[in-house]
């Protein structure tokens, strides 16, 4: 994610799309803060209420359904060109610097800072009475079994994917360039992609249900991530995403929203998520119906998720390519700051959430207020401070 543009040409629409997704990540983590649906450093307790449950569950699940998969597809699209330009050794070294070092910095510096400074009374800090004891315990636990990698799991996964691809190319070089091959975003190709992701997710969740974390990663989503990363590599060879017509992109985007949200509500309602009166234990039990296992609910949710991932990715990429490809000064600043924002937004939004603790209002309202504060604040801090720190500007 730190480098998604070629050395000679800049894809402004992809820069802008990436910026939008990172804004959505901030909103998503703030939603987890106030909804309690999901795992985050800080979850604020609120009296359960139906509107908040419906809003947050739809918003979080819908955004989760397509956002990170789209970033993996974009990363896959730029991977072959980077490998061809740099060669194996330089490519791996560059990926380690841009993805591995930031992840290591986050694990060793950012998470300990959050735990010790911002959340002294939480489970993250344990019972240490001083920082050296806390930090040594943190390291001895393997960075809390790499849970301390936080949102940088994306960079770790992308580093692994990239190195595996580079090694595969070293063993088996690519065939002759097929950049002039066919690829117009046909329904059959995209429907097949949805089916492949669905089957992969359904089977993977037999072993790793939703909510399962393995060394800091939610493997339950990795069918989508791996397959869309591969799809991005294939799209580079065929120029598939550049051949999607505006009409095709528009139809898939409309379908993703107009069908995606009502279908998600229906699946969760039938699974028993929206039970009134709201009780946390009942909500957790209902979510277990779609989390995994050999069941109709699990398959239907995997199918819904795959449909939204593909439809929103195709639709948004076409929309940004055709309508939102501006490369002006503000857009460039936002794009240049986006990786720093992704890496450092957790301590910022935690600080804002803690500062708003005494505000008594509905969780959705607190989420909206915090979002209006945190999104611009994160980008301002990243551009005017973080990117100017000598150590950080070498890896961000």
Image (spheres, helix red, strand yellow):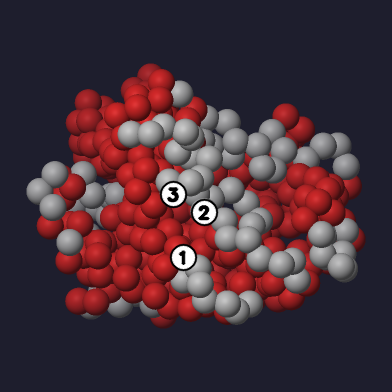
Q: In this view, does 57 lie to the left or right of 286?
A: left
In what element is the residue under mark 3?
loop
Estimate the x, y position of residue 161 in percent, counting from the top left.
44, 34
List the residue tagged with mark 2. Answer: 42
Of circles 3 and 1, the one toward us is: 3
- For label 1, count other residues whose C-alpha is less than 10 Å away and answer few (under 14), some (14-19) or many (20+): many
- The CA distance from mark 1 to mark 2 is 8 Å
Is residue 188 depicted above or below 160 in this figure?
Answer: below
Kindly check if marks 1 and 2 are in contact, taking CB atoms under 8 A apart as contact: yes
- Pick the front one: 274 or 353: 353
Residue 390: x, y in percent?
Answer: 10, 48
Left or right: 220 as drawn, with respect to 171: right
Q: Which of marks 2 and 3 is in front?
A: 3
Q: Residue at x 69, y 63 (%)?
A: 57
- Mark 1 or 2, nearer chain start: 2
Q: Are marks 3 and 1 in contact (CB under 8 Å)?
A: no
Q: From what the image shows, is residue 115 above or below residue 65?
A: above
Query: As drawn, is 177 to the left or to the right of 83?
Result: right
Q: Where is residue 258 in the image (x, y as percent from the top left)?
A: 70, 76
Residue 143 sits above or below residue 198 on the image: above
Inter-mark Cα distance, 3 to 1: 12 Å
Counting from the top left corner in percent of width and height, residue 11 is at: 30, 63
- Where is mark 3, residue-wise? 119
Other residues around mark 2 within 10 Å, as few (<14) / some (14–19) / many (≥20): many
Residue assigned mark 1:
353
Mark 2–mark 3 Cα distance, whole angstroms, equals 8 Å
Disc 2 or 3, which lies upstream in sequence?
2
Marks 2 & 3, CB-CB < 8 Å contact:
yes
């Amino acid at each position: 994610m730190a480098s998604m543009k070629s050395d000679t040409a800049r894809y402004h629409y992809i820069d802008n799309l990436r910026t939008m997704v990172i804004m959505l990540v901030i909103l998503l983590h703030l939603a987890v803060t106030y909804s309690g649906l999901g795992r985050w450093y800080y979850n604020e307790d609120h009296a359960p209420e139906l509107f908040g449950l419906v809003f947050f569950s739809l918003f979080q699940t819908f955004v989760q359904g397509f956002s990170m998969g789209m970033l993996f597809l974009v990363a896959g699209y730029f991977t072959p060109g980077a490998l061809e330009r740099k060669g194996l050794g330089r490519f791996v070294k560059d990926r380690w610097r841009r993805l591995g070092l930031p992840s290591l910095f986050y694990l060793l510096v950012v998470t300990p800072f959050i735990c010790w400074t911002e959340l002294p009374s939480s489970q993250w800090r344990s019972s240490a009475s001083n920082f050296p004891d806390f930090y040594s315990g943190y390291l001895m636990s393997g960075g809390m079994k790499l849970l301390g990698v936080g949102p940088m799991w994306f960079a770790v996964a992308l580093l692994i994917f990239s190195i595996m691809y580079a090694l595969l190319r070293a063993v088996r070089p690519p065939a002759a360039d097929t950049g002039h091959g066919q690829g117009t975003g046909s329904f059959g190709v995209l429907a097949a992609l949805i089916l492949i992701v669905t089957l992969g997710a359904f089977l993977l969740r037999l072993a790793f249900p939703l909510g399962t974390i393995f060394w800091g990663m939610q493997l339950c989503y990795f069918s989508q991530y791996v397959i869309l990363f591969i799809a991005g590599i294939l799209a580079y060879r065929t120029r598939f995403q550049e051949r999607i017509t505006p009409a095709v992109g528009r139809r898939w985007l409309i379908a993703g929203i107009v069908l995606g949200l009502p279908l998600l509500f229906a699946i969760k309602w039938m699974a028993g998520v929206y039970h009134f009166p709201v009780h946390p234990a009942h909500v957790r039990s209902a979510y277990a119906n779609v989390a995994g296992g050999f069941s109709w609910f699990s398959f239907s949710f995997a199918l819904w998720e795959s449909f939204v991932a593909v439809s929103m990715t195709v639709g948004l990429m076409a929309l940004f390519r055709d309508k939102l490809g501006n490369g002006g000064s503000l857009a460039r600043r936002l794009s240049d700051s986006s990786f720093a924002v992704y890496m450092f937004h957790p301590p910022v939004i935690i600080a804002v959430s803690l500062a708003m603790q005494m505000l008594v209002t509905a969780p959705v309202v607190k989420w909206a207020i915090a979002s209006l504060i945190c999104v611009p604040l994160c980008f301002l801090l990243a551009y005017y401070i973080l990117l100017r720190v000598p150590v950080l500007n070498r890896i961000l």
